[in-house]
Image (cartoon, coloured by chain):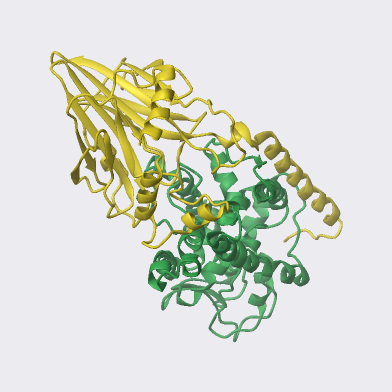
Amino acid sequence: MDKFLTLTALRRIVQLTAFFFFVYGATVFTTFYTDDKLTQALPALSCAYDQKGGDFCTLIPLQHQMDHRVSTLFTEGSGVMEALMGTLITVGTVAVLILILNKAFCGWLCPLGFFQEVVGMIGTKLGIKQFSSLSRETINKIRPIKWFIFLFLVLIFPILTGIGLLGHEWGSPFCSICPSRIMTTLAVGDMSQVYVSQAGWGYFALSLIADLLFGLMIALALFVRQPFCRICPILPMQTLFKKIGLLRLVKNGSSHCDGCSNCVKACPMDIYEIAAHAENKNITHTDCTLCGRCVEFCPHDGVMSFKYGPATILTSSKESFKKRVKVDKWWRG
Amino acid sequence: MKKLLIPIFAVATLWGYGDGVIYWTPHNCDEGKKIYSKYTSSEKNTTHHKQEHSGKKHGGHGGGESAMFALMNLESNASAVLIRPDLSNEPLNFTINTITLPRPKTGGYYAMIAEANTTEYVYSAIRYVSMHGRPAGISPTKLTALSKTALEILPDPLHREHDRYTASKTYRFVAMFEGKPLANTAMTLETHNTPAHSLTTDEKGVVKITLPNDFKNVTPDRNANKPSEFLVTLQHDANAKHYISTFTMPYSANPNDFWQSQEWGAGAIFIGFLGGLLIYRRQSTKGVQRG
């Protein structure tokens, strides 16, 4: 029994609980209505299209505000506060949430992140060969995509729609392609979000991309860790505030770190920067999901740590490393 | 006004829609839409209006909705009241049979209640209006839970804010009399294109209603098709009186019935999945087992 007492085991329990809350929570904890949702600006992909979900992802109000409010700065000469008030409230809510849990929303709470991890576990158990960490070249090519998606699909296209330069389908284009929309609605038995639209080329393109992306994500998740997370626009959104996050990943490699790169191999997002030398430094990267695998798989005492404010809540050690490796071998059979 | 009332009357009489009951129906006149648009946007011309007038395609919130409603079949004196999201209320004044909603202080669900009494009959009509604006911060469950008329058709739940009732989807309603569910009671559902048909509540007073797919000449665009109206009627005898209550709301064509193919969607997911497997096959010789 003791072998199950690892950070990952705890994370799985939290993820499973969060999955039920964010996908089915309206049936127990909140209600069906928007006004009753927990934050309405969650920095994780908890989809508003899921009628039984406990909360909404922040990207849906953000896109709507760009479309219906921020655009009025250009079309009507609205006052800055009038046009930006909704966005400020949404962004302010995200800032408060990031302050509390930082990027752990991804690694611990996101329903789509958990779904991909479960698919990955299934892939492992099916004996599908798991790919090792992606190369730096591949990672460097992939990383800008999330910023492109954030800037264009979450901010710019919705504003252009509000101005009237694009059709209505571009008012919430990220939601139109988001795999969480399809995954969470299917999870509650709602098939209505699986479709290809013939309402125009824009609708057609977005709906086709959404379906292809969803299928691709599932297949990739069988052998690559967290495929969609790597391009998720929630990461840039969180990054705006990660400096103020109380929870953070700290590296103190001054005396013990021998550059084994176990941390990079363990990282599901292939953040090779965490292997670099650092002395008591916050190394929470833009792509980090604060899953804690790097802390678990670091074989050196006190090199990798989770800190919350001034308190160290978890630190790497030889003992925990040995235990974690045993669990990993047991899991892989 | 006559131009609007005549087509409504003509359509209504085609199926006998709403015969013998009072019910709310929206005025689709420009004036009503203009007022609604003012309520839900900034005081200057809205983006929606500008785009509508310039012919650009846009289907933002509040598009085509009206702040004016008519109480149909109004013969005797009737009273109407608007219940706000915070459950406070204010009377609505009729001009002939039409009311204009006042400017809302917050967004959220509002309930329009009309009542008319005769010596033998007690008529009531309920309609909910979702207004866009500053969040009320109050759960709509409080508004729906409030007992508004003696006989009441309770949506369980209403469609979510910013959403809409949609054809081919199933919704739950509860028949209530003096705050208690009415078991095994008949309700009728009718629309402008589908004649009335009867449904019976279960032991808990619940009935599940699937809105009919009865839209004609549908344009393949979610915002290009005007919503239709459905009317649910509930009748009950008690206290030597005959109670009749109605519930009306708009409903829209279901895109999956017309211009969205779910088969193609499932096929695209499968192709995406195959694409992923192809990547696996190409890369598997290069990859190294993760440790």
Q: Is residue B7 visible?
A: yes
Quadrant of residue B130 in the image? top left
Name the foreground residue: B210 vs A113: B210
In this rendered view, identify the residue nearer to me: A293 or B67.
B67
Q: Nearer the viewer, residue B115 or A133?
A: B115
Residue shown at 53% from the left, 84% from the top? A280
Residue B71 sits in which quadrant? top left
Q: How many marks?
A: 0
Q: Is residue A258 left or right of residue B117?
A: right
Q: Which chain is yellow?
A: B
Considering the image in quadrants, where does the C terminus of chain B appear? Answer: bottom right
Percent coordinates x, y for residue B207 in the rendering: 38, 22
Indicate left or right for A19 with B101 as reference. Answer: right
**Vertical order, A119 against B245 (above or below):** below
Horizontal and vertical percent for residue A16?
Answer: 50, 49
**Where's residue A267, x and y in %?**
64, 66
User: Which chain is assigned green?
Assistant: A
Give the residue drawn at x 45%, y 34%: B251
Which residue appears at 61% of the width and 82% of the height?
A256
* Residue at the front extreme of this rendering: B2
Q: Please indicate whether residue B122 sits to the left or right of residue B69 in the image.
A: left
B230 or B37: nearer the eye?
Answer: B37
Residue B158, how many percent across, how many down? 37, 37
Q: Is residue B160 above or below residue B171?
A: below
Residue visible at 38% across and 61% down in the picture: B42
Any part of residue A88 in sight: no
Task: Please identify the quadrant where the N terminus of chain B is shown.
Answer: top left
